[in-house]
Image (tube, rainbow, N blue to C red):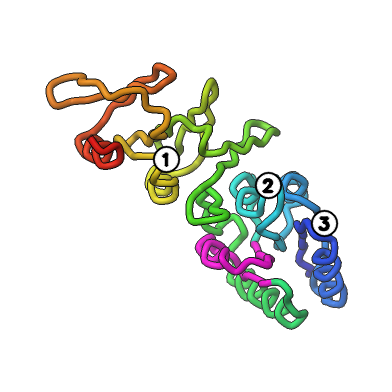
Amino acid sequence: MKFRIAIVEDEAPARSLILNFLKDISDVEVVGIFENGFEGLKGVNDLKPDLLFLDIKMPKLNGFEMLELLDYMPFVIFTTAYDQYAVKAFEQNAIDYLLKPFTKQRLEAALDRYRERNSSKKSGTSMKQFSGGIIQGGEFIQRIAVKNGSKIKLIYVEDILYFEAQDDYVMIYTSGEKHLKQLTMKYLAMHLPPDQFVSVHRSYIVRIGAIEQIELYQKDSFIIKLKNGQTIPISKAGYSRLKNVLGF
C-alpha cells in the first residue's frame, strides 16, 4: 500500500528536486504540493497525508508556526538550509531533518525511518504536540501565530501587553484584543526576551514597557497597573524579579 505525501516548500527548485527524487519510489504517492505555510495549513488539514515534507524558513508563516496551527498532525520530515533549527525539529519528534542540499540517498534514508516508525503502528497524531512559539533569528520568540476560525494572525511580541495562564492554555492580551493559545507559562518564561518581559506571578507574564506603575495593595502586597488601566497581581517572587529588572 502506498503512503501519501504532501510537500510544503516555498522554493520551486527544492520542490522539483523532492518530486524528482520521489518519482521512482514505488510505495509513495504525492497528494499535495504547497508553496507556503498558509496553503500548506489548509491542504494538510484537508488531505490528511501520512507524511509531510516541510520547509522551515518560509515567509509569512514558517514551518513550525504552520505545525502549531494544524488540526491534523501527520509525520514530518523537515527540509531546510539552516542547521540551527535541527534541535528544535527533533524536540518536536520529527521523523528526520534534511539539510539542503541533500541527496536522493539521504531522502531515501529518511523515508526508511518513516517506514520503521509507521510499522510500529504509531499514528501521526501520536506525535508530540508542537509546543508553539517559533524561535527565529535568535534565541527568543519574536512572534506567535494564533488561529481564530479560518483566520490566522501573527502577533509580534512588541504588541503584547501580558500573558495570563488559563489551565492548559495562555491568553495573550494586546491593545484591544485577546487570543487563546495552547502554550505553557514555563515555555514563555524561558523563550520570551528577558529585557522585554518579566514573570510577575505564576499566572502572569508582563511586558516591561506596558507597566505604568507599581502600587501597594495591602501590607507587603503589590499590584501592577498597566498603561491601559489593567491591574495585575504580583507575587513575592515576582516582586523580587521586578526589582532586579527595573533596578529599584
Q: Nearer the viewer, mark 3 or mark 1?
A: 1
Query: Residue 204, percent across and down?
Result: 36, 34
Which image quadrant: the C terminus? Answer: top left
Query: Residue 26, percent across and down?
Result: 83, 76
Query: Residue 171, percent across and down?
Result: 47, 32
State which quadrant residue 105 falls in: bottom right
Between 212 and 42, the residue placed more toward the observer is: 212
Asked whether residue 77 appears in the rendered view, the answer is no
191 relative to 110 in the view: left or right: left
Q: From which residue to which does the magenta span run?
A: 76-99
Local crowd size for mark 2, using a 10 Å CA cut-off: few (<14), some (14–19), many (≥20): many
As helix, strand or loop, the secondary structure at mark 3 comes to: strand
**Per the image, is 110 magenta?**
no
Q: Which residue is mark 1?
A: 196
Q: Which residue is mark 3?
A: 33
Type of amino acid at the residue the image marks with label 2? Leu
Q: Which mark is residue 61?
A: 2
Image point (77%, 62%), residue name:
4
Image point (56%, 51%), residue name:
134
As helix, strand or loop, the secondary structure at mark 1 comes to: loop
Type of amino acid at the residue the image marks with label 3? Ile
First in residue order: circle 3 vs circle 1: 3
150 relative to 104, above or below? above
Type of amino acid at the residue the image marks with label 1? Gln
First in residue order: circle 2 vs circle 3: 3
Query: Residue 216, percent across and down?
Result: 20, 21
